[in-house]
Image: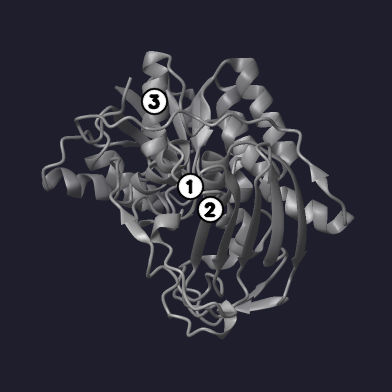
Amino acid sequence: MIKIAMVGCGDISRIYLKNLTWTFKEVELYGVCDFRPERAEKAVNYVKGEIENGAEVPVPKIYKDMYEAFADPEVQVILNLTRPYEHYDVTKNALLSGKNVYSEKPLGITIEEGDELAALAEEKGLHLGGAPDTFMGAGIQTCRRLIDDGYIGEVIGANVSMICRGHETWHPDPEFYYKKGGGPMMDMGPYYVTALVNLLGEAKALTGMTKKSFDKRLITSKPHNGEIIDVDVDTHLAGNILFANGAIASIFTTFDVYYTQQAHFEVYGTKGTLAVPDPNTFGGPVLLYRPEDFVAGPTVDPALRKIEFDPYTKFRQIPLMYDYRENSRGLGLADMCKSIETGRAWRANFRQQHHVLEILTGFSKASESGKFLELKTRYTRPEIMNNNPLHGVLDE
C-alpha cells in the first residue's frame, strides 16, 4: 500500500479526497497539509465522515507544513494540489527530499521550470507525474483505440476549442486564474493538449496568436462577490500544432466569450471523423462518422442547403470500451503508485507533462516573436489502458 501526503486542500482536493477514500484501493491517504490549517482540518473531517458511512480507510494525520510531510519516512508520494504558480516550488522541494511526486496541472508555469523538474526527477531516479489524467478515462481511451485500429484512417488533423466567459461567476476563489500561470491555455489547455498528444502523438512545432481582452474582471461568485481582479495574463489564445505524423491541429482557448458549448474536439482522418468527448471529463459520448454514413444530397453548394442544428446527427455513438467513466481524478496517481510497486511504466508521467507544458507556453512565445516555434521536448505515447476486473485496482 503506497502512502500519500496531500499538500494543498483547496477546491480541487474534494474529488481527490472522495476517490482516495472510496475508489482507489491500492493507495492510502496518510496525511494532509495546507497553509490554511482550517482547510487541512476540513479534509480530515471529510474522511472521518466517510469512515462513519462505511469507508474502510484510516484517518489521515495533519502536518504543520509541507516540510514536515517531506520528512515523514512513511510517506512515499507527495500529492501536490497547490495553486499553479506554487507547483514548481512544492515539487522541487519534495524531489530534493527524496519523495516521488504527483502534481496537479501544469507541471510548472514556464518551460524552464519544467526543464528543471524533469531533469531533477531523472537525476534522483524518482517518479514524477501529474494531471490531467482524464485521458486515461473511458472516453478518450475509446477514441485512442478507434484511431489506433484505423477507424478514421490516417490522421489528417484536429480542431479543438475551449470557449467560456471565465471562472469569476462560479469559482469560490477565481483570482489566480488571471495571474501568472493562469489563463485559459494554462488552466484548461492541459486537458485538450494532453488528449491531443495521446491521440496524435508527439508534436514538433507550433504557431500562436494571443491577447488580453479585459484588464479587469468583476467577481460575482461568493465569498468574493463584488471584488475586482487585475488581469495579468492573456485570456484569448489561438494556435496551430504540427505533429510528427504530419497532422495539423488548431486549438483555441478563451475566457472572454459568451457561449453555450464550452468544449469542442474533433479529429479528422482519411476515412472518417471522430468527435471526442470533453477532455475535462472521463466518459463519453464518442461519436464516429465514416464514408458509409455519408448520404449524398442534392448537387448544390452545401452552404445553400438547409443546415440541421445538430452537426452530429448522422454520427454513430460508439460504446465506451474502457473503465472509469465517472470523475476519476486520482486515476493517474493510482497508476503511478502501481508503477512504484511493480516497476512498469506509468501513463501520466512527467515526460508527457513536460511536452504538454512546452506546447502550452509556446503559443505566447510564438505570438510575441511572430515566428514558427520548433519544440525541443520529445514524447512517446503511453500504453493504452487495460481493463482490470476490479474497479480501482490498476493493471500490472
* Residue 259, label in figure: none
Label 2 Cα crowd, 10 Å radius (few <14 / some 14-19 / many 20+): many
- Describe the element under mark 1 as helix, strand or loop: loop
Q: Residue at x 59, y 37 (%)?
A: 201
Residue at position x 38%, y 67% in the image: 314
Nearer the observer: mark 2 or 1; the answer is 1
User: Closer to the camera, 304 or 57?
Assistant: 304
Residue 99 visible in the current orientation: yes
Q: How crowded is the residue under tag 1: few (<14 C-alpha within 10 Å), some, or many (20+)?
A: many
Front residue of 174 and 379: 379
Work out how far the residue at label 2 is from the one at label 3, CA to CA, in angstroms. 32 Å
Count all numbered tags in the image, as a single digit: 3
Residues marked 2 and 1 touching at CB (< 8 Å): yes
3 or 1: tag closer to the N-terminus: 1
Q: Horizontal and vertical percent for residue 3?
A: 35, 26
Q: Amino acid at mark 3?
A: Cys
User: How far apart are the alpha carbons under marks 2 and 1?
Assistant: 9 Å
Q: Percent from the top left, x then y, of residue 75? A: 40, 24
Whether residue 11 is visible here, answered yes or no, is no
> Closer to us: mark 2 or mark 3?
2
- At 59% from the left edge and 62% from the top edge, which residue is drawn? 177
Q: What residue sits right under mark 2 in the picture?
A: 267
Name the residue that disc number 3 marks. Answer: 337
Residue denoted by label 1: 152
| Quadrant location, the C terminus | top left
Residue 214, percent from left and from top: 71, 77
Q: Are marks 3 and 1 in contact (CB under 8 Å)?
A: no
- Secondary structure beneath disc 2? strand
Residue 57 horizontal side relative to residue 330, left or right:
left
